[in-house]
Every structure is written in structure tokens, then in C-alpha cells.
Image (tube, rainbow, N blue to C red):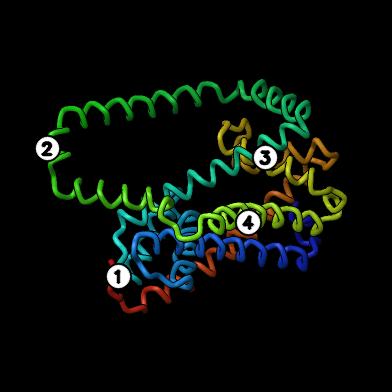
Amino acid sequence: MFAKISNANFYWLSLAMLVGIFSHWLRAFRGVMMYDAMGYSISTKNSFYAVLIGYMMSYIIPRAGEVYRCVSLNKTDSMPIEKSLGTVVTERLVDMLILLLIIAFVFVIQFDLLVNFISHSLDSKTESTTNSILIKSMLTLFIIISIVLFFVFRKKIVQHAFYQKLKTGFTTGLLSVKQVKNPILFIVLSFSIWIGYLLMMYICFFAMQSTSNLGIFECLTVFAIGTIGVVLPAPAAGAGAYHFFVIQSLLLFGVGAEDGKAYATMVHGVQMILLLIIGSICSYIVLKTKNKNAIN
């Protein structure tokens, strides 16, 4: 596998990473529109730093990136964390809607292929059933305990000043999308971000001879299946769900398992290294940045 990666064309990889970074910049610019809707004047530069820091932290502490993104904005622009967290949730809802549209489109053009793939994947996960049941049981127990504790202490919780501040700020951030000055541009940016991610994956196809013959529709299919892989448990010990589903989806188009593994590992690895480096640089810049008062 590593021999295949070392023989990859790093020109195409570099181009793909540039497209990916540009997509992150679009995400940062879209965020500025939401911050502006709440009355906070935040530069695209600082928003871009925050986005990259968030991606870096997601590799270090899973799912923590969004929080650190908000912390970064608080450091550079005094933006309340609870408000920026609200915008993050709104962004994720918009992103989820776009992803569902992409998956729906792929299902239309590759219906039989995807149905057979999902059925096969679900049938092949029997070995991990016990672990899956255990994890789901623990998660369910945790949710039940959390609900019970909230119910018991709900009066004290909802009356607490911190809760009221968090609720108000979070709601303001969540609804900021309704106040953006240019809704059409917001929609265009939202779609452009994911078009950029798709182009990044497509350009990476040219980095390896075994995937260079695949077209944009094959790329869409691999992208959709990879997204499904984030939701469904993967029966591959030692491999991430995304990697497993990308490998399996490439098999559908005649790409060998070893080549598929090399592709998934290469793309994920290059992105990870790049974002860790750039994110570290952005973290240093943010730490050295003097806080300024936001316009509220």
C-alpha cells in the first residue's frame, strides 16, 4: 500500500488540497455572513483561522473542532461562544440538507448499485453485532440518565443565569441565518463548499493510475457512499468507517481493494497532515492576536 502511495502523482494531490483549502475559505466567508447578521464585525481572515483551527482540533480530539473554532473567534473578536456555537449548528443543518440532496441525486442515477451495496454492507457486519449492541446500550443508558437528571434538577438549571445566557446566545446564533443580508449568496456559498469537496476527491483520482479513469459520476457515488459510511457501522477491524466505505465503493468500479485502501489512506493522510500544520500555524497567530471588542 505504501509503495502505491509513494508512486502517486503529488501534483494532483497538491492541486486537490488547494481546492480543499479554498472550500474551507468559502466556509469561513459564509460564517462571516452569519456573524454579521448578529451584529459582529469579524474579518474573513479571522474566521478562516478559526475554521482551520477547528479542523486541526477535530483530528486531535474527535468532535471538538467546532468548540475550538468558537473559542478562536472569542479570542480574536470577543464573540460570545454560545452565539458562535448556534451558528455552527445552523451550518451543520444546512450542510446536512445539501448532503441529503447529493445522496438523493446519486441514488437516482445509481439506484441498483447503491441498494445492493448497502444490503451487502449490512449483511457483512454480523461479526461486530455484539460490540454494536453494547455501544448502543451504553449510549442509550447515558441518554436516559441525562434526561432523568435534567428532569430532577430542571427548575434550578433553567433559572440559572448561565443557562439563560447560553440559551439566548445559542438561539440568536441558530436563527442568524434568517437575518443574512444576501440569502442567495449564502445558498451559493453553501453549495460551492460541497462542490469544492467533490472536486477535491475527483482531482485526487488522477493521482493514482488505478483511479485516474473514473469520472465525476463515479466520484459522486464514492462520495455518497463515504458519507453513508459515517452513519453506518463498518465491519472492518482497525479501519475507519469512512475508509472502509470508500474502499468498498471503489471496488464497485473495478478498483482493487489494495488500490482503494491506498487511495483512502493517501487522501485522508495528506489532508490530515496539511490541516495539522496549517492549523498549528493559525493557532500560533491567534494566540498572538490581541483581543478586540465586538460590535454588538
As drawn, 18 above or below 263: below
Which three-letter amino acid code belongs to the residue tagged 2?
A: Lys
Q: Earlier in the sequence, mark 4 or mark 2?
A: 2
The answer to whether marks 2 and 1 mark residues whose Cβ atoms lie closer than 8 Å is: no
Residue 173 lies, in percent from the top left, at 35, 52
Name the residue carrying label 4. Answer: 192
Task: Say if residue 238 shows up in the picture.
Answer: no
Mark 3 crowd level (few <14, some 14–19, many ≥20, 10 Å Cα): many
Q: Earlier in the sequence, mark 4 or mark 3?
A: 4
Which three-letter amino acid code belongs to the residue tagged 3?
A: Ala
Which three-letter amino acid code belongs to the residue tagged 1?
A: Ile
Circle 3 — which element? helix
Question: Which one is closest to the eye, mark 4 or mark 2?
Answer: 4
* Quarter of the view holding residue 117: top right
As drawn, 20 above or below 261: below
Which three-letter amino acid code belongs to the residue tagged 4?
A: Ser
Which residue occupies 79% across, 59% down? 207
Q: CA distance from mark 4 to mark 2?
A: 45 Å
Q: Nearer the viewer, residue 238 or 270?
A: 270
Which residue occupies 20% across, 28% down? 151
Q: CA distance from mark 4 to mark 1?
A: 29 Å
The answer to whether residue 196 is left or right of residue 78 is right
Residue 55 lies, in percent from the top left, at 50, 58
Name the residue carrying label 2. Answer: 156
Q: Earlier in the sequence, mark 3 or mark 2?
A: 2
Which residue occupies 62% across, 59% down? 271
Q: Nearer the viewer, residue 51 or 232?
A: 51
Q: Earlier in the sequence, mark 2 or mark 1?
A: 2
* Quarter of the view holding residue 116: top right
